Structure formats: C-alpha cells, structure tokens
Amino acid sequence: EYNDMATLMFNSGEATINQLFSRGTSGMLGYGALFTMLVVYFVAACTAMGTAVSAGVVVPMLLIGGCYGRIVGQICVDISEWHGGPWPRGDRWAWVDPGVFALIGAASFFGGVSRLTLSLTVIMVEISNDIHMLLMLMVTIMVSKWVADFATHSLYHSLIELKCMPFLNDEIPNYTAVGYLHMDRYPVSKIMQTEVVTVNELALVDDIRDLMDSSVSHSAFPVVSESAQGEVLVGIILKDSLREILRHTDLFHSPVSVPPRGRIPYGRIQASEFSEKHSSILRGKADDNYSGGGGDADDISRRRGDGLQMDLRPYMDQSPFSVIETFSIERAYTVFRTMGLRHLPVVDKLNKVVGMLTRKDMQGHDIAHALEHDDDDHQSHA
C-alpha cells in the first residue's frame, strides 16, 4: 500500500528530492505529508547545523525548498481544477506542474541561504536536465538573493560569527547598535588597544621567555629601538617567530659581545615549524631530539639569569604597516581589508608606539561598543 508520508520520511535524501521534483505527479504527495516533512526536516536541519557533527547543507536546502515549492505547485493545480476540468489540460493551465514548482522552490531556498548565483544556476539546470528551465531559475535565484540580502547575511557568514572568526566585510558597517556612525570622523585612538607590549630589537632572553608565558591580547609585538626621541617603532615580529628563535640558544649573546653571525633560514622561522614538542625549551628544559645548538637543561637554566640578549633585527618585519593615532577608523579598515593585515601598530607624531589594532578590533560590534563607551565617558565628564 502506498503512503506519501513514508515516501518522504523513510527514503534517503536523494530519493526524496527525486520524488519532489518528479513531473506529472500531481496528487501523489498530499498537503499533510508535505507540511509535516517541511516542519520536521527544517527543525532537524537547523539543529544539526548548530551542533558539532558532520552534516551537509546541500541536500537539506534542496529538500526544504522542494517541499514548500511543491506545496505552492499543488495549490496552483487545485486552483486550475477549480476553474474547471481535471489537471492537466491543454490550455493556459498546462504549465502548472508541482514538480516544476518544487524545483523553483529548491532553487529559491538554496539561493537565499547560500547567496550563490551563477554556480547555483548551473547546478539546478543539471539537476533538472532541462535547459528550458534556465531563464526561470536565473530569475528565481536572483530574486531570492536580493530578498535575503535585504533581510540578513548568509548562513556561512553566520557560522563565521558563531565561531568568533574576525572576518572583515568589503565595507565597514556604519549601522550599529548606537545608530548610524560616520566612521571616517572617528580616529583609531578610540578603538585601539592601548596596553601594547613592545620588545627591543636587542631583547633580553628572560624578558622574551616571560612574554611567551603572558596572556597578551595580540600575537605580534612592535619592535622598538632607542633614539633621541625615545623608543621608536622599527619593526614587528610574530609571537610564533619569537618561540622559534628561543629554540636556537646559540644565537644568545651577552650585552658586551658582538651578536652571532649565524642566521635561522626563513623557512624555519615560520610558525608551521614550531610545534608543542619544543615548548619545553621555553620552560628551561632540554629536548633530546633537538640539535639546534641549545645545550643541555642545566646549561639553559644557568644561562637564564645571565642577562643574555637576542638580536631580533634579522627576523622582524623591518617595514611594517603603521598608522598615526589620528588616522580615521574607516581608512584603517580599508587598509586591513585590502592588505590582508593581522596587526596594525598605531604611533604618534614621533613614531612612538601608542596602540595596536587587530582584526578583532575592526569588527562592527567591537567598534560600536568602543565608541559607545567613549561617548558615555564624555557625557559623564561633562
């Protein structure tokens, strides 16, 4: 005995989609089965997407869209029959087919969720195997994308926000919780991190080791040098690069001696070369498999208090991007977005480091939060 609910519920996702897209099958799937499948599968798909399980989104999007598309198609069939005569008939109502509406519904839901355009059109034409559906699918996908863009961002953007990944949009968001803000009118000093840890180009080994154990909010450190104006910015170095340099204890030297001429190859200084098995070096322990010229554990422990230095100049970025503290937030956002930066030191007129910008500081909600607190401080002082 045929059961439309069992056809939808107990088949695989691919078989169910084929049933929804089938042509000339009006009445095969009733309203009750379609509505039940739509609600149950939509809730199940949303639940699966929010959990840490391996679950795809393509089949659920096609199936959910196919369900409500077939419901609309079945309604059109009922309307055509209400106008007189059984379906299908060779008149102006002959175009009404629930399978075609299911295909259009699947394309609209897929396009609204993913915001794909050209590639989705090709996928749906290949699924239908009917080139005559091309124009209708193009119109459907573009309209669904426009409507979805007006309402909210895509599913994948939401997943990025849930994982707290510092993703930057093409343009800085001016509409915030505190209203419309002209970001070009606000300087970066309003949102920068003021508690910046800097390192000297001839840094003490003990200071670098202590820095590795600290909970600093940024993973790169401005490198400064002594000058007549004070400590000025001369470069920037990543935290992972400092870890790798610490492994090469043969590069340490005393303040009165000449820095060693040995250099770490560029490939070795990359973050991928550092692994947890070498972290014992940071705690003053030797690694039996390490042959980088470090010595044994007693030697390392003994040398910790000798005021040894390391020369960071060969390994730092000697031409880092930096902005002055009066630089506007909007232009700093553009620099971050176009140059693919992770860190941006902020300096004053004398090139002294006064702050640090990271991708997290350039998020719309963080900018709005910082500016809101700044306005509250001004009002309280007033």
Image (cartoon, rainbow, N blue to C red):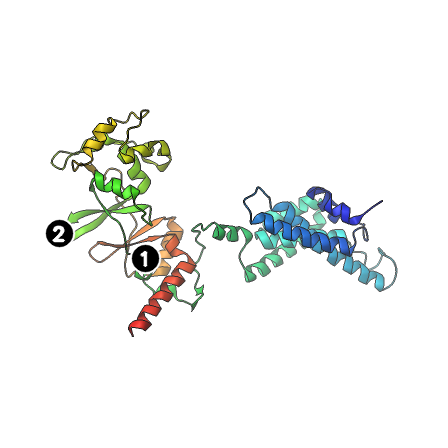
How far is the residue under mark 1 from the one under mark 2? 26 Å
Q: Residue at x 40, y 63 (%)?
A: 368
Q: Which residue is mark 1?
A: 192
Vertical relation: 101 (above or below) 266: below
Q: Quadrant of residue 238?
A: top left
Viewer-closest of 129 and 67: 67
* Residue 68 screen position, x and y as percent: 70, 56
Outermost residue to the bottom? 382
Vertical relation: 124 (above or below) 303: below
Label 1 residue SS: loop
Disc nearest the viewer among 1 and 2: 1
* Residue 23 screen position, x and y as percent: 78, 49
Camera sees residue 216: yes
Outermost residue to the left? 256
Disc 2 marks a residue whose amino acid type is Ala
Q: Quadrant of residue 214?
A: top left
- Labels in figure, total: 2
In the rendered image, which quarter contains the N terminus?
Answer: top right
Viewer-closest of 274 and 297: 297
* Residue 252 screen position, x and y as percent: 20, 33
Disc 1 marks a residue whose amino acid type is Met
Q: Which residue is mark 2?
A: 228
Residue 18 lies left or right of residue 199; in this view the side is right
> Is the residue marked by circle 1 packed among few (<14), some (14-19), or many (20+) residues within 10 Å?
many
Q: Quadrant of residue 94?
A: bottom right
Residue 250 lies left or right of residue 152; in this view the side is left
> Is the residue marked by circle 2 packed among few (<14), some (14-19), or many (20+) residues within 10 Å?
few
